[in-house]
Amino acid sequence: MPIFEYVCRTCQGTFESLVMPGENEGPVCPHCGGRDVEKLMSAGAIRPHGIPTGGGGWKLPKCAKAAQAKQG
Ligand SMILES: [Zn+2]
């Protein structure tokens, strides 16, 4: 599973969280419980035991964006 590192804008604390496919809501800060978190693109996200090397990179949920555009 992909593990991403996040930083909390409320308390500036950093933490890691699993991201499930289709998950829309961001994780909650374990330090202060805030939801105002930002995903970090750090090398810490790459783990030797959890690298999905089966395809050609990340697949973005295009269909979700398309649906939002239609709902406008
Ligand atoms: Zn926090």
Image (spheres, rainbow, N blue to C red):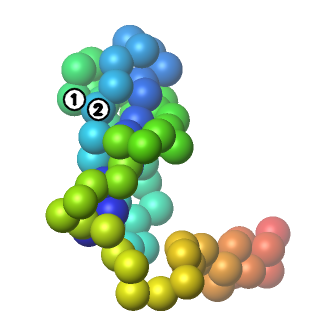
Residue 71 visible in the snapshot: no
Task: Tell how many labels.
Answer: 2
Q: Residue at x 43, y 54 (%)?
A: 25
Residue 18 sits above or below residue 71 on the image: above
For label 1, the SS is loop
Viewer-proximal residue, 28 or 12?
Answer: 12
Identify which amino acid the numbered label 1 is placed on.
Answer: Pro
Mark 1 residue CB less than 8 A from any atom of ligand 1: yes
Which residue, given by chain and number where applicable, does mark 2 sit on?
Answer: 15
For label 2, the SS is strand
Which corner quadrant of the image does residue 43 belong to? top left
Q: Residue at x 39, y 79 (%)?
A: 53
Mark 1–mark 2 Cα distance, whole angstroms, equals 7 Å
Residue 57 sits above or below residue 29 on the image: below
Q: Earlier in the sequence, mark 1 or mark 2?
A: 2
- Judged left or right of residue 56, residue 25 is left
Viewer-proximal residue, 8 or 68?
Answer: 8
Q: Nearer the viewer, mark 1 or mark 2?
A: 2
Whether pointer 1 and pointer 2 mark residues with C-beta atoms closer than 8 Å, the reply is: yes
Q: Residue at x 49, y 20 (%)?
A: 9
Residue 22 visible in the snapshot: yes
Q: Decide: few, some or many residues near mark 1? Use Cα within 10 Å; few <14, some 14-19, many ≥20.
A: some
> x and y percent of residue 3 in the render?
31, 54
Q: Which mark is residue 71?
A: none
